[in-house]
Image: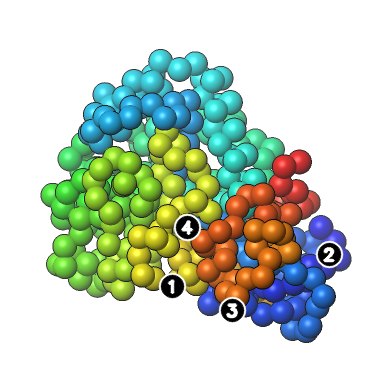
Amino acid sequence: MVGMQLEGTVLWGRDLDAIEGRLHIERGLIVDFEQTHVDGADIIMPAFVNGHTHLGDSIAKEAGAGVPLKELVAPPDGLKHQLLQAAAPETIIRAIRGSLQVMIDSGTTAAIEFREGGVDGVEQLLAAQAGLPIEVQIMGRSSEAALARADGFGASSVRDEDYADVRAAAAAAGKPFGIHAGERDPDDIDGALALDPDFLVHMGHAEPRHLRAVADADIPIVVCPRSNLITGVGMPPVADLHAATTVGLGTDNVMMNAPSMLRELEFAAKLTDLDARTLLQMATVHPAEIGGFDAGVLAVDAAARLVVFDGASPNLRYSKDIHRTIVQRATAADITQTLTAMQGEGFEPTDSYESGS
């Protein structure tokens, strides 16, 4: 990716300001942004970052309709764990790879994955990811051995297990520790907060005192509204959570939802009164910060990880508000290009990835 130029309306900086101009990219980095009138109608924005996934569930799409949350996903005997236990490793790898491709095709180039299956689960994800232009922060589960092989530890609720030892091990290793809390009720939130996690997932039943604690400790939260609707646990108070701390969006279990941030954005927009620009930050800037990715923001010297939408497509043409247009109506079919230059340890700059290729 040497000497590349893109022009159109660019969602620039942390505030995603819509500015007409031309991006200059060299060797996977944004080296300049020229603010000027251009003829093209393209909309250029940071690639999406999915703040919370369970990709192993890709083997069981639409399984468990109507099954209560605990019986569906709680370890070790929830339906999804039974299905994962029964599936052949090659089937799991193939299914995960397919979901990663769906994510890339819909503009996502980074994700935070809570990976079941211990060390074997981590290895399956690594095998599925091989050669694909997407960065995944793998949050292992089940054991300290999984933590050692993974990028961090992704815990279930404190009602499922005592995580004190593995939390200490994650801290000693300098690896992030995330945990589910407040998904079906508030009863596990205090226990999660006591572990001093690096981030929380769900918090749909957070009470005012929990929000104050989160704000005081500056603990970010990832919310998954579509998942919460399907499992019947209630909608997260996204605006209240946003007022307290940094909030990212995630798509959660593939068994329940396609891992498309565009779909998650549209649903979240209908759930809350937050403006479209803030919601886009929850799909880019914020989850990138939570996961520690060089992503989520278009700025000079940042990695050129971005999505190009065809602003002249029948779906997006005549937009009067670009932020709302992307949130409310953009689809994967409107994406003409995704750049996936991944700068950082273990990654070399990649060529551009063209969706659907």
- Badge 3 local density, few (<14 within 10 Å), some, or many (20+)? some
Indicate the position of residue 165 as horizontal and vertical percent values: 25, 43
Spatial CA distance of label 1 from label 2 is: 33 Å
Residue in the image at 44% along x and 43% along y: 53
**Dot placed on the residue nearer the N-terminal end, 2 or 4:** 2
Of circles 4 and 3, which is in front?
A: 4
- Across the whole image, how many numbered discs are drawn on residues? 4
Query: Would you say the residues marked 3 and 2 are in contact, meaning their CB atoms lie under 8 Å apart?
Result: no
Spatial CA distance of label 2 from label 4 is: 29 Å
**Dot placed on the residue nearer the N-terminal end, 3 or 1:** 3
Q: What secondary structure is marked by label 1?
A: loop
Of circles 2 and 4, which is in front?
A: 4
Of circles 3 and 2, which is in front?
A: 3
Q: Which residue type does callout 4 highlight?
A: Leu
Spatial CA distance of label 3 from label 2 is: 22 Å
User: Which mark, by number, is residue 275?
Assistant: 1
Q: What secondary structure is marked by label 2?
A: strand
Query: Would you say the residues marked 1 and 2 are in contact, meaning their CB atoms lie under 8 Å apart?
Result: no
